[in-house]
Image: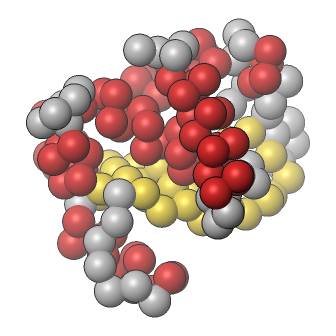
Amino acid sequence: MIKANVISGHSRWKRFIKKPNDYLKKRLKILSKTSYFKKKNHEFSILLTNDKEMKKLNNKFRKKNKTTDVLSFPIKIKNKNSLYVGDIAISFDIIKDRSKDSNFFLEFDKMWIHGYLHLVGYDHKKMSDFQKMLRKEKLILKYFH
């Protein structure tokens, strides 16, 4: 089973997702029933933050002095029964802005899924890798939306 630990770093998230740990737990439970995720024993953390903090993180870790939607910090740490795969940070401001033309939960799901895929080894440096990752994201999103 995949487990997410959510850290609420900005209060505006609570207006949209009252209990983010419960929200993600439900999503991950759905995924755990699929063939791809059934045998995964991963754990990761998500920081729900804002543009200001994302800009700081992006500058500190990627030397880019601008905000971004999602950052992933892969790391592999073996626990008793699972593998800790890393941390994800997501900007409320960008999700909120994108959801004007879409849906807040859809945009949030896109971001944590994108971040999770980075944690487990996907990237999008080449166009072929981008397309592969995008197909995987869309496949996962179909289970929720």
For the C terminus, give its image quadrant: top left
Query: On screen, 141 above or below 82?
Result: above
Residue at 12% across, 36% down: 100
Q: Could you say where residue 12 lies in the image, as x and y percent from the top left? A: 14, 46
Query: On screen, 11 above or below 141?
Result: below
Residue at 75% across, 54% down: 121
Q: Could you say where residue 85 lies in the image, as x and y percent from the top left? A: 72, 52
Q: From the viewer's perspective, is 136 left or right of 49?
A: right
Q: Could you say where residue 88 lies in the image, as x and y percent from the top left? A: 51, 55
Residue at 62% across, 33% down: 135
Q: Could you say where residue 55 lies in the image, as x and y percent from the top left? A: 30, 76
Q: Nearer the viewer, residue 93 or 17?
A: 93
For the N terminus, give its image quadrant: top right
Q: Nearer the viewer, residue 13 or 137?
A: 137
Tell which residue pokes out farthest to the front in this image.
127
Residue at 79% across, 33% down: 41
Number of marks in picture: 0
Query: On screen, 9 above or below 64?
Result: above
Colouring rule applied to residues: secondary structure
Q: Is any atom of residue 5 visible in this view?
A: no
Q: Nearer the viewer, residue 20 or 93?
A: 93
Figure quadrant of residue 3: top right
Q: From the viewer's perspective, is 72 left or right of 74?
A: left
Q: Is any atom of residue 126 visible in this view?
A: yes
Q: From the viewer's perspective, is 80 left or right of 4?
A: right
Query: On screen, 131 above or below 25?
Result: below
